[in-house]
Image (cartoon, rainbow, N blue to C red):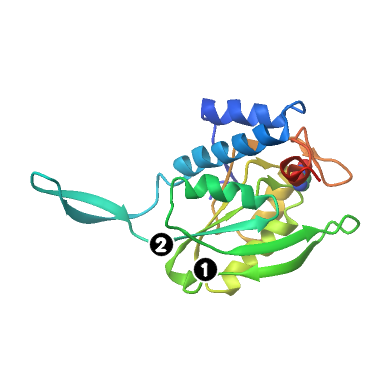
């Protein structure tokens, strides 16, 4: 499996550029992040399995499709929560789990504070979302958590990734396809992605 799929659609790249711009204010930042997530989801769902169904049009019976598996979204709190609405705009009946984690500012290790996941993850297609894949610690831990609860078919979706984060994720979860809008240059000494877009949570929530 390739390390990470970078989605280079022009609309995605233009919206990402707006997110990177330090002059983009909170309201606009939130709206664009949601729109960008929806566009990413449109791209990454291309290969999702479907099954045949038939419907009755006003005129006659017609063959069509529906998604073969229920979708479960798992945003990593807190910044992942804003991606949720972007995904739900395209897959409105998805079930939603939450994983609350923060990065200890000294050790840069993930610290769990909340986990609530839907049942029957083994039958679902699980999409774990977090805007930033920095050290990778949080994403690795979140995907390990959904695996422990039975998930098998998992995708990881972020918007900006670092090479360090991708390498760390791949070491533990070589079976999980990863998608991003950008693979940036490197991490700084505080674990921020360069050039990145700053602290996504702070820019979303004004903290
Ligand atoms: N989290 C963020 O919000 N931004 C980074 O650059 C790294 C982690």
Q: Nearer the viewer, residue 58 or 143?
A: 58
Image spot of residue 17 (x, y percent): 66, 27
SS for dot 2: loop
Q: Residues within 10 Å of mark 2 (few under 14, many from 20)?
A: some
Q: Is mark 2 within 8 Å of ligand 1?
A: no
Q: Is residue 83 left or right of residue 19?
A: left
Image spot of residue 131 (x, y percent): 66, 45
Q: Is residue 46 depicted above or below 68 in this figure?
A: above
Of circles 1 and 2, the one toward us is: 2
Q: Nearer the viewer, residue 58 or 69?
A: 58
Q: Give the quarter the ligand 1 occupies.
A: top right
In the rendered image, is residue 6 in sight? no
SS for dot 1: loop
Residue 8 occupies which quadrant of the picture? top right
Image spot of residue 111 (x, y percent): 79, 65
Residue 12 occupies which quadrant of the picture? top right
- For marks 1 and 2, give the CA distance: 12 Å
Q: Is residue 162 left or right of residue 69?
A: right
Numbered badge on residue 159: none
How many marks can you see?
2
Q: Residues within 10 Å of mark 1 (few under 14, many from 20)?
A: many
Q: Where does label 1 land, which residue?
A: 151
Residue at the (30%, 54%) spot, across then down = 66
Q: Where does label 2 land, which residue?
A: 70
Q: Earlier in the sequence, mark 1 or mark 2?
A: 2
Residue at the (59%, 67%) spot, across then down = 146
């Amino acid at each position: 499996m390739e390390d990470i799929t970078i989605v280079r659609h022009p609309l995605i790249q233009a919206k990402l550029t707006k997110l990177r711009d330090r002059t983009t204010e909170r309201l606009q930042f939130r709206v664009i992040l949601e729109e960008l997530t929806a566009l990413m989801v449109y791209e990454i769902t291309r290969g999702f399995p479907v099954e045949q169904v038939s419907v009755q049009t006003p005129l006659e019976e017609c063959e069509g499709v529906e998604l073969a598996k229920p979708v479960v979204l798992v945003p990593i709190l807190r910044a992942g929560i804003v991606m949720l609405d972007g995904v739900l705009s395209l897959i409105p009946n998805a079930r939603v789990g939450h994983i609350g984690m923060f990065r200890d500012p000294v050790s840069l290790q993930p610290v769990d504070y909340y986990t609530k996941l839907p049942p029957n993850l083994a039958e679902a297609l699980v999409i774990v979302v977090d805007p930033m894949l920095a050290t990778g610690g949080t994403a690795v831990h979140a995907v390990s958590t959904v695996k422990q609860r039975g998930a098998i078919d998992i995708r990881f979706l972020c918007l900006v990734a670092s090479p360090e984060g991708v390498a760390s994720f791949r070491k533990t979860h070589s079976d999980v396809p990863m998608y991003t809008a950008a693979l940036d240059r490197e991490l700084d000494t505080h674990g921020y992605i360069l050039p990145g877009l700053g602290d996504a949570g702070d820019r979303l929530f004004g903290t």
